[in-house]
Amino acid sequence: MALADGRLLANRKPRVQSVKFTDPSLASLPSPSTIGAMIQSFIFSEGKLVGRDLDPDALRLVRADRGLLLWIDLYDPTPEETKLVLEEIFSFHPVAIEDCVAPESLPKIEDYEDYLFLVTHGVDFSRQEAFHSTELDIFLGKDYLVTFHRAHLRSVSTVIERCAKSQGVVAKGPDRIVHMILDQMVDHFKPVVDGLRSRLEDVEEGILEPHNDTDLIPQLLSVRGEINKVRQIIRPQRDVVSRLTSGDSKLIRAVMLPYFRDLRDGLIRVDESAVAYADQLLISFDLYLSKSDFQANQGIKTLTALTALTLPATLIGTWYGMNFDNMPELKSPHGYFGAALGTALLTVLMWVWCKRRRWI
């Protein structure tokens, strides 16, 4: 698929989407055509979507028009596409581009004066695939927004679908689009937390089941790892949103501050839930260890009872097995029956004693 400079992008199918510009001032822009299929662009005028998926030359014209709002979403772009958008069209700082291309372990926010660079993480959870997260990098400028992600993100696709279907005002500023994306991310944390709670309840049921001999240590460690991962993502992400609510950045309008504060409160609730589940997991782990110790003690009691029951026979058999010549019982015609009766009687008494101590 050819770009403006004649280069070909491998493994990309050309996509031409008809776009109707509702703003007369945009009629002279080049028609959308050959930009990568995984790069989507959206142009807003006075809060309304007026065009999308333009070629690079058109994007440069829109970028130069201060009356328009431009949003570019890069979904697993090629190195050529990354260089085209991040370096040639927007001229972002090399450090920010490097952080964007190389996966970042934790969310963060950097202020480059003319724009903010945010690293965030979207999450997903399924009982089959368990918990996983996807990094979303955001460049927030005064009249533009660039999002970058290597994997599909429901939060971004939901906002794109909402923008495409809306006939009215969608966003009068890029901070509004950022809020919409982050709001979807926070909403997607709820099924993750619910899934972790469900897994924790399953583990607790297994622990409390009387005759369950399954080794639950791997499940406990797995749930603990997922809870820790959620907390590792939530806390820095909460700090990122808190920076946006401070009002220090000129790129966040005052009208949007209450909305970002609501996002911060949502992340705090998720973090508190994760902390509560972590504490509950520790209790479950202690309960499992106590149950294991109890089962081990029960086994020891059973072995002790068996040893006690065999003690009379062992004692009498050993006593009369001594090789002394002067042992009158050995020559008695009733000696064998007396030893057998004594062994049986002592064994019964030992069984009653073990039973009263609840060893058997």
Image (spheres, rainbow, N blue to C red):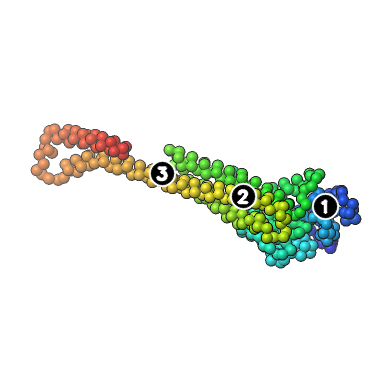
Determine the residue positioned at 52% across, 41% down.
Answer: 202
Q: CA distance from mark 2 to mark 3?
A: 39 Å
| Label whose residue precedes the other's in the sequence (3 or 1) | 1
Front residue (pair 145, 129): 145
The residue at the far bottom in this view is: 94
Left or right, residue 27 beside residue 159: right
| Amino acid type of the residue tagged 1 in the rendering | Ser
Left or right, residue 28 beside residue 275: right
Residue 66: tell me if it is visible: yes
Badge 2 density bin: few <14, some 14–19, many ≥20, Cα 10 Å: some
Q: Which residue is mark 3?
A: 291
Determine the residue positioned at 65% across, 51% down.
Answer: 261
Determine the residue positioned at 45% across, 38% down.
Answer: 209
Q: Which residue is mark 2?
A: 265
| Label whose residue precedes the other's in the sequence (2 or 3) | 2
Q: Which residue is mark 1?
A: 45
Badge 1 marks a residue whose secondary structure is strand
Of the 4 image quadrants, the one containing the N terminus is bottom right
Of the 4 image quadrants, the one containing the C terminus is top left
Residue 13: tell me if it is visible: no
* Residue 359 percent across, percent down from the top left: 31, 39
* Residue 225 percent across, percent down from the top left: 54, 52
Badge 3 marks a residue whose secondary structure is helix
Q: Are marks 3 and 1 in contact (CB under 8 Å)?
A: no
| Amino acid type of the residue tagged 3 in the rendering | Lys
Q: Are marks 2 and 1 in contact (CB under 8 Å)?
A: no
* Residue 56 percent across, percent down from the top left: 83, 59
Badge 3 density bin: few <14, some 14–19, many ≥20, Cα 10 Å: some
Left or right, residue 281 beside residue 83: left
Front residue (pair 173, 54): 173
| Amino acid type of the residue tagged 2 in the rendering | Asp
Q: CA distance from mark 3 to mark 1?
A: 65 Å
